[in-house]
Amino acid sequence: MTVVIETVKAREIFDSRGNPTVEADVILSDGSLGRAEVPSGASTGDREAVELRDGGDYLMGKGVMKAVRNVNTEINDTLKGVSPFDQAKVDKLMIDLDGTPNKSRLGANAILGVSMAIARAAAQSQGIPLYRYLGGVDIELPQPFFNVINGGVHADSGIDVQEFLLTPVKRDNFRDGVEKIANTYNTLKSVLSKEGYETAVGDEGGFAPKLGSTEAAIEMLYRAIKEAGYVPGEEIAIALDPASSEFYNDNTKKYSFEGKELSSNEMLIYYQELVRKYSAIIFIEDGFSEHDWEGFKKMTEKMGDKIQLVGDDIFVTNPVIFSEGINKKVANSILIKLNQIGTVSESIETIKMARANGYTTMISHRSGETGDTFIADFAVAMNAGQIKTGSMARSERVEKYNQFLRIEEELEGYAKLARFPKK
């Protein structure tokens, strides 16, 4: 019996920030069901695929009923009777139906929800896990990065750097790495509490203490790592995501950072000195604004052989934009966010492009998340090497790590581990 798509439908649900988002169902002719929930970012690149919102008074303008209707009408009509087993073909049908360069007519949230649900339905129809369906036999578990201190637009901590992350450099298996970070995370909470800081958490589950500076936060991380019984840099390493587009002034070409107005060159000097002082720092993401390509290029020239330099807002998981970055030798790694580009197949295309050009890849969540664990299976399937999906708090974050634990168990000790850095 030939299996085809029978019904595509969507509904409005809510994400971890209490904002509406799209949930899509795909039902196949054999009864298989694929369901997917779409995340949403707070710190977003200007050239990301467009997340369609309703505007007006309903839910403060953030409703997604237009996107839902687009799924239930045009997308459903187009995909009915189509085979679910050719992901690229299905995604292209939706891209062509939308007809815009940034998915603004139907909404990237509408298209992505269906794209992910199609993959899930196809995997269920074939009776195999999603990571097997998307990746085949040669798969591995990624190096996880945990956001343990939140700043920037993710918290009211007063710290300009958006994310301070920890990763278990030494780990016997995935569970061992998670346990090491859990120990360090809870030790960090104790350290902050002893010093009189608040231990409430931000959007991504990291603590949001009013430390006042990047170095103060890094010092807290060093202290927590040591008090948890580990060696900074050798067993637990540190990563930073300044999300610098958030504090860059397009008119003055300056960065308003920690009470100072810094030029690109001054920011570069700051990063160089920071990495020299704190050798446990192994990557910096979005050290320069998405509009400051020259600054990012200089950073790559000066620091690219020492640490991983990740491009997020500057590339927005878009293969066309990313190819420009490759040609200009900007960054040496790319962050992959499915909702930045809007389909599973285009995300895969970007990963393949990165690999072919010597860039590392990191799969990422968004600050407005759901309980959907798609990106965990996707990271394993793609041999992505690295993932960040929040802290050891908030179930929508931890559930992704728990999915990796389930996958590791399913693989019965045969799971390969990616090692940082994956070149």
Image (cartoon, helix red, strand yellow):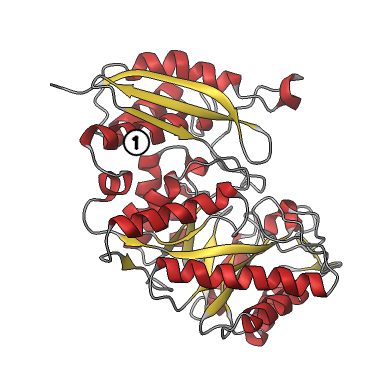
| Pick the front one: 34 or 65 | 34
Name the element at disc 1: helix
Residue tagged 1: 120
Q: Quadrant of residue 279?
A: bottom right
Identity of the residue drawn at 83% across and 67% down: 197
The picture places residue 406, in percent across and down from the top left corner, at 38, 54
Q: Position of residue 372 (x, y in %)?
A: 48, 41
Is residue 413 among what the camera can see?
A: yes
Left or right of 219 in this view: 303: left
Name the image quarter holding residue 59. Answer: top right
Q: Is residue 363 above or below residue 217?
A: above
Q: Is 343 placed left or right of 197 in the picture?
A: left
Left or right of 397? Residue 256 is right
Q: Is there any visible trace of residue 110 in the rendered image?
A: no
Give amino acid for label 1: Arg
Identify the image quadrant of the C terminus.
bottom left
